[in-house]
Amino acid sequence: MIVTAQKPLDEIFDSISPYHKVLIAGCDGCTQPPRGLREAETLKQLLELAGRKKGKDFEFKVTSVVKQCDSVLTTSALKPQVDGIEAVLSLACGIGPQMVAELFPDLIVLPAQNTHFLGEEDREGGKIEARCIGCGDCILTMMGGVCPHTRCAKGLLNGACGGARNGKCEMDPEKDCAWELIFERLEKQGKLDNIKEFRPPRNYQVKAWRLVP
Amino acid sequence: MTEAVTEERLAVKLDEEHCSRCSICRSLCPYDAITKEAETGKIILNIEKCQVCGICYSACPSVAIDTIYYDRGSLLNYLEKAKQKYNSQTLVIMCKGSAPDFAEVEKLFGVSNFIPLSLPCVGRISDEIFMTALEMGIGKIYVLACDEDYCRFHRGSPIAGRRILALNLMLGQLGYGKEAITLKRSSLKVKVDKDLCIACGNCVFYCPYHAPRLESEKGVSVDLDACKGCGLCVVMCPAFALELEHWERERISALIPRLLSEMKPPKLLVFRCQWAFFPPLDGKSSPNIGVIDLPCAARVDAIHILDAFQKGAESVLVAACAEEDCKQEKAGGKAQRLVAKLNERLSQIGFQDRLHFCSVAPRYHDGFDKQLQEFSQRIKELSKGEKK
């Protein structure tokens, strides 16, 4: 999932305050927690309360799109809603506001989220952790299923650094040392030889900015 | 509890003089709150463990246990007054657990004008109450219990079933007709609107009873036998695709402005778990306070709290059971976290100290009033400070 966190409410408030008719557009897609209709409705209520306090009156409309990264779905969901709207406040990840901006060039588009990373959720512990940085050159086969790009604080490809204490990273004692995890898993799989193989620095040229499927 | 607990505050009392030390209560108590002193054989009630389920009260052959919530005097007093107020000879006794609205009662029993009596558990009402009610001129009694495996306490519904069966046989012989008391069962369940479901899986994860299933992108389906009707999934659903029967979002939303319009400022709206406090039948309320009882603290919804602020509430209090007292799965803690999260957002827009959480338990019958007093005091001080 794409992990986002909502921007501070005063920042959102400031960004929408030049406008009166605002459409709050949720996204049911892959963000976690899903920023769908409930989030949109909650944000509307909070912004209205804030507006009352600051003497600013908004006219909100609330909707949600199945996936804001899909041009067809976004067009069909938003087209009937944008009549008279000055600004769209998007609850999607960074892709959503850009998609809306492209599809509706006359509208002001504002993000309500800060997009952080691709991650997995440990719901029991209430934590969401980064798992992928989208490097375009996946080496998980060699690494026993643990990504050192993402999970090693130093991004080492030839670890470990030697700084770990009791399996925890020296940069953040809450965090597992990625290289110890890699070692344990490869040992269980009988593939410890993988670790000996030298890996050159990450090839940034591979990172494509446009893919044709 | 740090303060000394006075005898008057207790909702359940054991009268040593009448106690025959038969130990039936001890063997029935589901919470190990009753013990027997080894040397003397004295029966001892540990109120801190007691969940006020009433099973000891309803089973004691010596009438040595009394709980304030089924007190004969106040029940009969209520009936006497309610007979006039509702101008009806039909009594409908409802268990809090199945928590129906009156329209639903009408649908179930086909009666429109009736005396409503909502009790924590219908399985605890003594035969005497039924018989005295009939004597008082009530012609027909309907009882709405929870489904058998749904009891928030312990076996209340099966006990009610057996008791009413026996009572009806006896009443039949006494000439009250074949079925003086009619029993029906019901329970709260969740409903899915598949058109709204976005198949995100939140409900699957959060449900403590593994009732929702997500097997395809067509949306979630709920195993209604497993659903215990706490409403947590409803609050966690990001798409408003789930609703709890009789406690629909719109229905609670409609209650908020209605209550607030009848209140005087400063208005305090309380969202209360109905298991955290059992209001007295003749309870009088303050004009500043409105209460919305919810089926469980898990149904406390940020949308409704914000709604209350929007519609003119100065402050909102969420009252729930403590985690260890929860009749569901630690819902009190979940509500507390929801309040904390919402408070963080509210403080970003300058709404500090308006929303509070407290936990109460019906074992002290004035527990909620005490919390309310404390909170009202704080609010008063706060508003004084603001005016300065």
Image: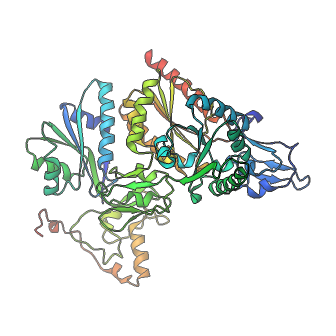
- Residue in the foreground of this view, choosing between B250 and B276: B250
In the rendered image, residue A143, in percent from the top left (x then y), is placed at: 34, 75
In the rendered image, residue B113, in percent from the top left (x then y), is placed at: 52, 37
- Colour mode? rainbow
Q: Quadrant of residue A129?
A: bottom left
Q: Residue furthest top?
A: B388
- Residue in the foreground of this view, choosing between A79 and B371: A79
In the rendered image, residue B241, in percent from the top left (x then y), is placed at: 34, 52
Residue B276 appears in view: no
Q: Is residue A2 above or below residue B99?
A: below
- Which quadrant does the N terminus of chain A fall into? bottom left
- Residue in the foreground of this view, choosing between A174 and A55: A55
In the rendered image, residue B360, in percent from the top left (x then y), is placed at: 61, 40
Q: Does residue B354 appear left or right of residue B360 in this picture?
A: left
Q: Residue furthest right?
A: B39
- Which quadrant does the C terminus of chain A fall into? bottom left
- Identify the residue at image location x=60%, y=50%: B182
Q: Is residue B229 above or below residue B372?
A: below
Q: Is residue A157 above or below residue A171?
A: below
Residue A91 appears in view: yes
Q: Does residue B349 appear left or right of residue B325 in this picture?
A: left
- Identify the residue at image location x=81%, y=45%: B63
Q: Does residue B294 appear left or right of residue B161 in this picture?
A: left
- Identify the residue at image location x=36%, y=83%: A193
- Identify the residue at image location x=31%, y=58%: B194
Q: Quadrant of residue B274?
A: top right
Total marks shown come to 0
